[in-house]
Image: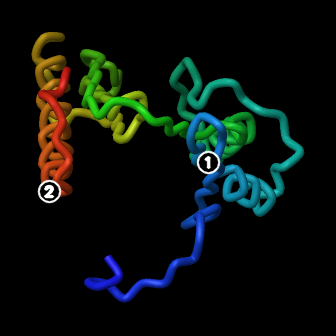
Amino acid sequence: MHITFSMKELGFVNYFLGISVTKTAAGYVLSQQKYASDLLAKASMSDWKTYSSLMATKSSSSALPAAVKRLLRYLKGTLSYGLHFTPGPLLLNAYSDSDWVGNVLDRRSTTGYCVYLGPNLISWSAKKQPTVSRSSSEAEYRALAQTSAELSWIGMLLADLHISVPVPIL
């Protein structure tokens, strides 16, 4: 790579773009504990109690600042969380799900998926579907289509890097 690109060897990465990289016996852990702690300190919420869930279980017409405070209180309780990366076989696996007419206001479904390369989570998404599904099957098919598109893109990316993987499992 030094022939093609002008590079400087800086050693092992330990903090990059707000992400802390820690080497463990099992692999690596990526977290944003420092970034989140700084955010809580800036909002003067370092000493506040935590929430165990991100969203309220019942919908209400509360103002946006109340929702932001809840998000930050949830974040305070998850400071020790991170992504663990460990060596493993190069197998692509994906899981998808949807909730049919999950939004009570516009009746649109939410799609979610996560993609693993071996034991490591490498891609995930949760978003509202663009149109209203007529059935739970249609909502699930839309979720599978989005997950398949992501798997296809990751497969092409790995192929460009000359990494061959077997057919993914969805």
Disc 2 vs disc 1: which is toward the camera? 2
| Residue 85 can be seen in this image | yes
Residue 21 lies in what quarter of the image?
bottom right
Q: Nearer the viewer, residue 34 or 91?
A: 91
Q: Amino acid at mark 2?
A: Asp
What is the secondary structure assignment of the residue under circle 1? Answer: strand
Q: Residue shown at 32%/28% (left/top)?
A: 112
Left/right placement of residue 54 relative to residue 127 reads right
Q: Which mark is residue 19?
A: none
Disc 2 crowd rating (10 Å Cα; few below 14, some 14-19, many 20+) is: few
Q: Report the Cα–Cα distance between label 2 and label 1.
A: 28 Å
Q: Nearer the viewer, residue 101 or 146?
A: 146
Residue with the mark numbered 1: 31
**From the image, which quarter does the C terminus lie in?**
top left
Q: Nearer the viewer, residue 87 or 114?
A: 87
Q: Residue shown at 64%/48% (left/top)?
A: 23
Residue with the mark numbered 2: 160
Answer with mark 2 or mark 1, whichever residue precedes in sequence.
1
Q: Residue shown at 69%/24% (left/top)?
A: 52
Where in the figure is residue 169, as x and y percent of width and height?
Answer: 19, 21
